[in-house]
Structure formats: structure tokens, C-alpha cells
Image (tube, rainbow, N blue to C red):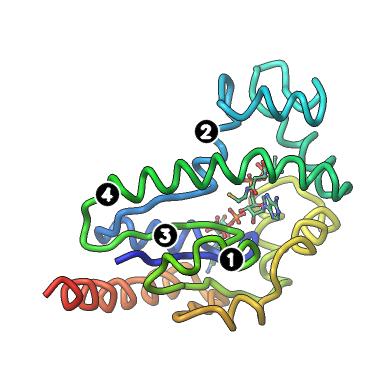
Amino acid sequence: MLIGLTGGIGSGKSAAADTLGALGADLVDADAISHALTASGGKALPAIRDALGDQAIGSDGALDRSWVRARVFADDEARQQLNAILHPMIRAECEARIAARQGLYRVLVVPLMVESGHWLQALDRLLVIDCPEATQIARVQARSALSAEMVHAIMAQQATRAQRRAAADDVILNDGSLEQLKAHASALHERYTRMATGAAR
Ligand SMILES: CC(C)(COP(=O)(O)OP(=O)(O)OC[C@H]1O[C@@H](n2cnc3c(N)ncnc32)[C@H](O)[C@@H]1O)[C@@H](O)C(=O)NCCC(=O)NCCS
Ligand SMILES: Nc1ncnc2c1ncn2[C@@H]1O[C@H](COP(=O)(O)OP(=O)(O)OP(=O)(O)O)[C@@H](O)[C@H]1O
């Protein structure tokens, strides 16, 4: 059984996925794959350098995430170029990892799942982590040095809460404490485990 997990920036996808993973779900995380592809020596770096220029690569040989972020969220063409390089590589790696997992159920964490539509047909269920936009902005700012304007610019390139909720089979409204999020995710784990066991019979 394959569960898609998505949500806007800072909504709590990783926190929800970590809970499901700790309880035994097999996780495949597109953001982590994207980071590996753009770490020093990463497979995507030559094409990104060709498209965006030498400044896209920092002195440590990895993607200069801050420079690239500022560039691509201010310039549609640059963002489309970056997406066109990274998204097919991320998808191929996700597919390979999903195929290699043998667990009772797998969870594929993809931030832009509703936006791209790419995975939706392959999923048994879509779980959306939802939270008010002001909370998304506050959480992202609390964990990074991004300006509120930058978080707005990123959110402007993402689906709305309503669009995500309309595509969802399950929704966790993550507007309370981390403990509440974990409790909600644990309840869903029980449900997914029952569904996966039933599907296997
Ligand atoms: C622009 C980059 C360099 C900024 O790096 P940074 O370390 O600040 O962010 P990180 O990669 O951890 O992503 C954080 C969040 O930003 C949002 N986001 C990232 N890229 C995009 C995008 N192209 N469009 C819309 N939202 C995006 C997502 O919510 C994501 O979870 C980086 O996000 C990137 O390479 N993006 C292109 C690949 C991509 O689409 N990744 C997200 C889906 S796997
Ligand atoms: N209910 C909550 N209460 C307090 N803090 C939270 C809650 N949910 C998430 N956080 C915190 O908010 C930040 C964003 O959460 P998380 O990284 O799980 O979101 P994400 O959707 O994976 O973000 P991104 O799209 O940026 O990768 C983290 O620092 C996390 O610990």
C-alpha cells in the first residue's frame, strides 16, 4: 500500500512522516533525495551549473541553496529550469526506492504532490498535512533565517490549502502542539496498518 504525504512549506510533513516512520512505515522522502542530488558531488549539479551559472554552486562544491532560492523564487524561468532538471531525477529515485521497500505500507513524502499531479494515480491514499498560512510562515521563520517575504514567495508557487484538501483522502490539521500531531499520525498509522493487512488478505 502506498500513502502519499504532502503539505505546504512548514506545514509539518517531516514531523508527521517521522511519527509514521518510527511506528514502522517505510518512508521515501523527495526533499531528502533532492538534497542528496544537490550535495557536493551530487548528480544534478553539472546541469544546474549550466542552467543557472557558476554562482549556483558554493565554495564547498554543494548547491548554494540561499543564492538559488533567492534566484528561483524571483524568476519564473529560472525556477522552471531548476524544476525541469531536478524533478525527473527526484521521481526516478523515488520510484527506485519505492520498488525496493517491502514493508506493510510505504509513505512517499512529496511537497509538490498536488501541484504536479504526477504521483496521484499511483497512490492508494493521499494524506495532507494542513495548517493555517500564518502558522506555516511562523514555523519556517522559527527554524530558518528566511524573511516572511521569501516564505510568501515560496507559498505563492504552491497549491492553496483548499486545493490540497480537495485532493486529500486524509487530512491532519496541524494547528496545535507537536504532541497532538503525533497522536493524530499514530491513529492514522493504526488505520493504515489495518487497511494494508486487509488488502493483503
Ligand atoms: C530552491 C532550493 C535550492 C531551496 O533550498 P532550501 O534548502 O531553502 O529548501 P528545501 O529544498 O529544503 O525545500 C523546502 C521547501 O521549499 C518548498 N519548495 C522547494 N522547491 C520548490 C519549488 N520548486 N516550488 C515550490 N516550492 C518549493 C517545499 O515546500 C519544500 O519542502 C530547493 O528547494 C530546490 O532545489 N528546489 C527545487 C527542487 C524541488 O522542487 N524541491 C521540493 C520538492 S522535492
Ligand atoms: N504542531 C507543531 N507545533 C510546534 N512546532 C511544530 C509543529 N509541527 C511542526 N513544527 C515545527 O515546525 C517546523 C516545520 O515542520 P516540518 O519540518 O515537519 O514541516 P515540513 O512540512 O516538512 O516543512 P518543509 O516543507 O519546509 O520541509 C519544524 O521546526 C517543526 O519542528
Specify which label sits upstream in the sequence, 1 or 4. Answer: 4
Inter-mark Cα distance, 3 to 2:
18 Å
Instruction: Report the amino acid beneath label 3.
Output: Ala
Residue at 22% across, 56% down: 103
Where does label 2 land, which residue? 36
Where does label 3 land, which residue? 17
The answer to whether residue 14 is left or right of residue 161 is left
Instruction: Report the amino acid beneath label 2.
Output: Ala
The secondary structure type at the circle numbered 4 is loop
Where does label 4 land, which residue? 101
Residue at 28% across, 74% down: 192
Specify which label sits upstream in the sequence, 4 or 2. Answer: 2
The answer to whether residue 134 is left or right of residue 1 is right
Q: Quadrant of the C terminus?
A: bottom left
Residue at 61% across, 46% down: 87
The answer to whether residue 148 is left or right of residue 26 is right
Specify which label sits upstream in the sequence, 3 or 2. Answer: 3
The secondary structure type at the circle numbered 1 is loop
Q: Which mark is residue 117?
A: 1
